[in-house]
Image (cartoon, grey):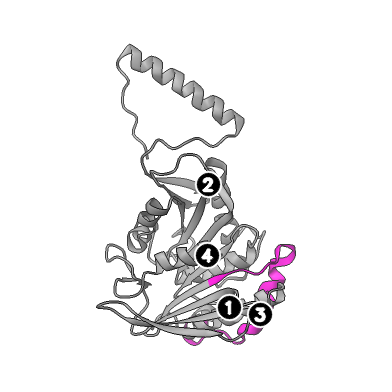
Amino acid sequence: MAVLTPITSGLARLLFVLSFALVMSLAGTGLKLAHAGSSSWTEYYYGSGFYFKVYVPSTYTGSQVPLMVMLHGCQQNADDFAAGTQMNSLAEQKNFIVLYPEMNYAANPNGCWNWFYTYNQVRGSGGEPDIIAGMVNWVKSHYAINSSKVYVAGLSAGGFMATIMGVTYPDIFHAVGVHSGGDYSYAYDASTGLAVMTYGTINPVADGDSAYQQMGTHARPVPVIEFHGDNDTVVNPINGTQCMQQWARTDQDAGASVHSNPDSSWNGQVSGGYSYTVYNYNDNSGKNWLQHYVVHGMGHAWSGGSTAGSYTDPYGPNASQIMWNFFTSH
């Protein structure tokens, strides 16, 4: 949090009073305040044991910018996830704000988002999707955010929750990034959630129909990108493929002619690191809606991340940069 220092000189005190009056007058009009020209990393209390952190880049001036929402995995927090993904550094380069919701450890002792409970898979139940959406609305009320450029990405449990956010709040999130997560599955408690992580979901196409039904009047096709290591022993890599199958069906139900199978694929190689394969799912006009990155040899980790954070692997393609490029291309 910010530290206030004493103001000693008469001139400084007068300038402070005048500037404070200006700030308060602007706040009263509902206008967003321009940033001071330096980056900020601030924690806020949301309520019910939930906190969140916001990174504002030094390039923010008060004009509208995109918002990236980052959902951490189990046993992580905002500081850890920010350090590992290096998303704040990218925000500094590209001029966008980053919101990091933090899971309440009292609600899950491992700090996992409870994506596997039914009440956390719907809108308006007061569950975790509503809490995350509320944090987004808080940021929108305090900063100038381009509402058509709000994105969500997450790792592991946060990846499953990112899918849920795209389903429950498609009117807020323009595109979704899932890393080492899965689809809008049939899970309804911890046991079925573990079964999905281990074996995959029963029917991703049916999950796609359920996701579309949950979207309700807000239904629309959603662009989605998914990363998965094919050596992931925590969340079976089949979940990545099923995530694509679910979203292809959901987008079809929502009116886009997204193909159920990949239209093309290509291979890449990180210098000194892993090889990977990218699968593209397009519509009838050739527009790309879904991308699936399979990183060969990588385990349960954020691809291309920094070892300053947990559950990262610097030898994979840079998921943070690639997700941002995918989001902004849509």
Left or right position of 300 against 150: left
Residue wearing tag 1: 187
Element under disc 4: helix
Whether 212 is among the magenta residues is yes
Residue 108 in the magenta stretch? The answer is no
- Choose top left, top right, bottom left or bottom right for residue 38: top left
Reading the chain from its start, which is encountered first: label 2 or label 1? 2
Which span of residues is magenta-colored? Answer: 196-224
Q: Residues within 10 Å of mark 2 (few under 14, many from 20)?
A: some
Q: Is residue 173 visible?
A: yes
Outermost residue, top side: 10
Q: Do callouts 4 and 1 mark residues in contact (Cβ within 8 Å)?
A: no
Which numbered dot is residue 329? 4
The residue that disc 3 covers is 284
Residue 172 appears left or right of 58: right
Query: 232 or 270, which lies in front?
Result: 270
User: Which of marks 4 and 2 precedes in the sequence?
Assistant: 2
Q: Is residue 233 above or below residue 119?
A: below
Mark nearest the camera among 2 and 3 is 3
SS of the residue under disc 3: loop
Q: Quadrant of the C terminus?
A: bottom right
Kindly identify which numbered label has been placed on residue 116: none
Q: Nearer the viewer, residue 112 or 99?
A: 99
Q: Earlier in the sequence, mark 2 or mark 3?
A: 2
Residue count near mark 4 (Cα–Cα under 10 Å), binned few <14, some 14–19, many ≥20? few
- The amino acid sitting under disc 1 is Ala
Q: Which residue is mark 2?
A: 139
Query: Does the residue at mark 3 contact the one at mark 4 (Cβ under 8 Å)?
Result: no
How far from the left and from the top, in percent, is residue 47? 52, 48
Q: Earlier in the sequence, mark 3 or mark 1?
A: 1
Extreme residue toward the left, this view: 272
